[in-house]
Structure formats: structure tokens, C-alpha cells
Image: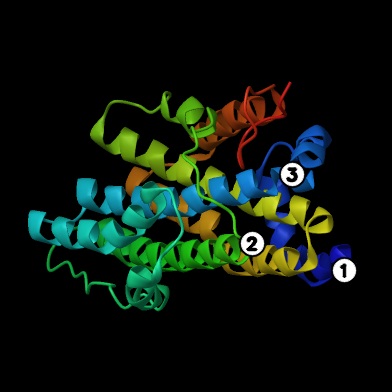
């Protein structure tokens, strides 16, 4: 039944499959599809949504905005960070704040008076991405609440760190590499949403299909920004990181995470 949910989204999946150098190994899918692993998977997914928003905010703070606007970004993220790092579900005292955050009512109006064209584009796209990621954070959080899953601290997979260690030290090169990596992570996330759909409870499967629909173009946004910043062809550099990513995805991991390799 869940396979049918994907039938209308092949046009979104085809560019992702063409971009990535490999699909998720069947062994990882089998491990992640274990019903006993669902709490772990959802908890790690929650962290991933927050990390995606944090990473977008960090790019803005590092390369675009001033100190005052940087504080606004941190204040925007703070309620979400408090919830996930607190390590438990909401109590009644948190309910109003939670409902406010669900509607992204804390979104600041971030503006850039001066700056280069790529900085304006980075601001516009990263603010939109943060809004979407934090909305998805709330959706995952609601699923966790509905299933009475207790939030537990999770260790990070080696996935992102395995790519980030190859970032160049120069100002422009470093930013281009971060944007390329961001695009690859977004593409892999969508590929995994689709890979998991046939194996999940239908309500969660439908949610993952909705994420695929809203996030499938994020990887292209990152690559477009990387191209703007680089002002030269980024294909070779992108392929280099894709080869690194392929090795991380296909090689054994010690822990099961949303972006891990198969656990051996």
C-alpha cells in the first residue's frame, strides 16, 4: 500500500537519484524498518531537522548578517533547541510556547541592506529553508508525542563529519564546500524518506511522502548558491564530495542513524 504513495513523486525523485552516486543499501533499510528501531529513527530525524536549521542559520551568521541580526537568528532557534536538548516531551506549562512555535510565529524579519548578490540570495533561501526545517521539526515532534516516545540523547553519526573534514580553509572555497555538502545531505535525506516509505506505518509513511514533496528541491538550492559564490564551475568539486558521501553511505557504521551506513 505504501509503495503507491510514491507513484506520483517519481519526477521529484529522478533528479535526486541522478545526482547521488548510490542508493541507500538494502541492509540499512532492513535495519531501519525494524519497528523496534522506529523510536530511535524518529528521535534522530528530529535532531536532523534541527541541525539543518542550525546549519542554515550558521551560514547566515558566518557569511551574511551583522551581530544584531545574528542574535535574532539565535533567538529564533532557541525554543527548538531547548525542547530537543531538554530530553523529554512537553508538559502543560510548555503547551502555549509549543503551539506558537508550530506556527513559526517567532520568525524574525531578517533584512540585508548592502552586500553582494549571493549574500542576498543566501539570506532569502536560508531563511525559507529554516522556516521549513523548523516546521518539519514540529511535525516530527508531534509524531513522537503521539507515540509516547521518550526523547533520549543521541550521538551523531559520522556522516556529516566525514564530509566536513574535507572543507577547504579559504573563505570562498570553504563556503562553496559547505554549500555543496548541504546540498548532498538534503538530497540523501529525501532519498531516504522515499526508501523508508514502503516499510513504515501508513500515517508516518504519508508524512515522509509530504517531506519529500516539500524538500526535494532543497539540494538544488544549495548547489545554485554554491555556483553563485564560486563564480566558476563546481562540478568537479561536487563530484569529489559525492564520492566521499558514497563511501560513507555504503561502508559499515557502529550505530544506526538516519544518515548512517548499515550497522555491522
Rendering quarter of residue 144: bottom right
**Residue wearing tag 2:** 147
Instruction: Say which of 233 and 210 sits in front.
Output: 210
Mark toward the start of the polypeptide (2 vs 3): 3
Separation of residues labelled 2 and 1 (CA atoms)? 25 Å
Q: Position of residue 250 (x, y in %)?
A: 71, 27
**In the displayed image of the protein, which residue is found farthest to the right?**
1
Q: Residue at x 67, y 42 (%)?
A: 20
Instruction: Say which of 18 and 145 sits in front.
Output: 145
Mark toward the start of the polypeptide (2 vs 1): 1
Judge from the rendering whether residue 170 lies leftward or rightward of residue 183; answer left or right.
left
Label 3 or label 1, whichever lies nearer to me, is 3
Mark toward the start of the polypeptide (3 vs 1): 1
Separation of residues labelled 2 and 3 (CA atoms)? 13 Å
- In the rendered structure, find residue 4 and report the number of the disc placed on it: 1
Q: Position of residue 65 (x, y in %)?
A: 17, 56
Q: Say whether residue 33 is visible.
A: no
Q: Where is residue 209 in the image (x, y as percent from the top left)?
A: 70, 66
Judge from the rendering whether residue 144 lies leftward or rightward of residue 118; answer left or right.
right
Judge from the rendering whether residue 122 lies leftward or rightward of residue 163; answer left or right.
left
Label 2 or label 1, whichever lies nearer to me, is 2
Q: Residue at x 36, y 43 (%)?
A: 230
Instruction: Say which of 179 and 71 sits in front.
Output: 71
- In the rendered structure, find residue 36 and report the number of the disc placed on it: 3
Dot 1 surroundings within 10 Å: few (below 14), some, or many (20 or more)? few
Residue 104 in the image: above or below residue 239: below
Q: Say whether residue 189 is visible.
A: yes
Q: Residue at x 46, y 39 (%)?
A: 153
The N terminus lies in which quarter of the figure? bottom right
Residue 87 in the image: above or below residue 259: below
Q: Position of residue 45 (x, y in %)?
A: 56, 50
Amino acid at each position: 500500500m505504501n509503495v503507491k504513495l510514491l507513484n506520483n513523486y517519481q519526477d521529484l525523485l529522478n533528479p535526486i537519484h541522478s545526482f547521488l552516486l548510490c542508493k541507500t543499501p538494502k541492509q540499512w533499510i532492513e535495519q531501519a524498518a525494524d519497528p523496534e528501531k522506529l523510536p530511535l529513527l524518529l528521535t534522530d530525524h528530529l535532531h536532523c531537522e534541527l541541525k539543518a536549521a542550525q546549519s542554515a542559520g550558521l551560514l547566515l551568521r558566518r557569511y551574511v548578517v551583522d551581530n544584531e541580526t545574528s542574535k535574532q537568528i539565535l533567538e529564533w532557534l532557541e525554543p527548538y533547541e531547548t525542547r530537543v536538548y531538554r530530553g523529554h516531551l512537553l508538559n502543560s506549562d510548555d503547551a502555549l510556547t509549543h503551539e506558537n512555535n508550530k506556527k513559526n510565529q517567532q520568525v524574525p524579519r531578517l533584512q540585508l541592506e548592502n552586500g553582494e548578490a549571493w549574500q542576498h540570495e543566501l539570506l532569502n533561501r536560508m531563511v525559507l529553508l529554516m522556516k521549513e526545517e523548523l516546521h518539519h521539526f514540529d511535525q516530527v515532534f508531534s509524531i513522537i508525542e503521539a507515540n509516547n516516545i521518550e526523547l533520549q540523547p543521541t550521538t551523531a553519526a559520522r556522516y556529516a563529519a566525514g564530509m566536513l573534514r574535507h572543507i577547504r580553509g579559504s573563505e570562498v572555497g570553504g563556503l562553496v564546500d559547505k554549500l555543496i555538502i548541504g546540498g548532498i545531505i538534503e538530497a540523501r535525506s529525501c532519498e531516504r524518506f522515499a526508501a523508508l516509505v514502503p516499510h513504515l506505518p501508513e500515517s508516518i509513511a504519508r508524512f515522509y511522502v509530504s517531506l519529500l514533496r516539500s524538500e526535494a528541491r532543497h539540494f538544488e538550492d544549495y548547489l545554485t548558491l554554491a555556483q553563485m559564490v564560486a563564480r566558476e564551475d563546481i562540478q568537479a568539486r561536487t563530484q569529489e564530495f559525492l564520492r566521499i558521501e558514497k563511501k560513507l553511505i555504503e561502508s559499515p557504521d557502529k550505530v544506526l542513524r538516519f544518515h548512517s551506513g548499515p550497522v555491522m
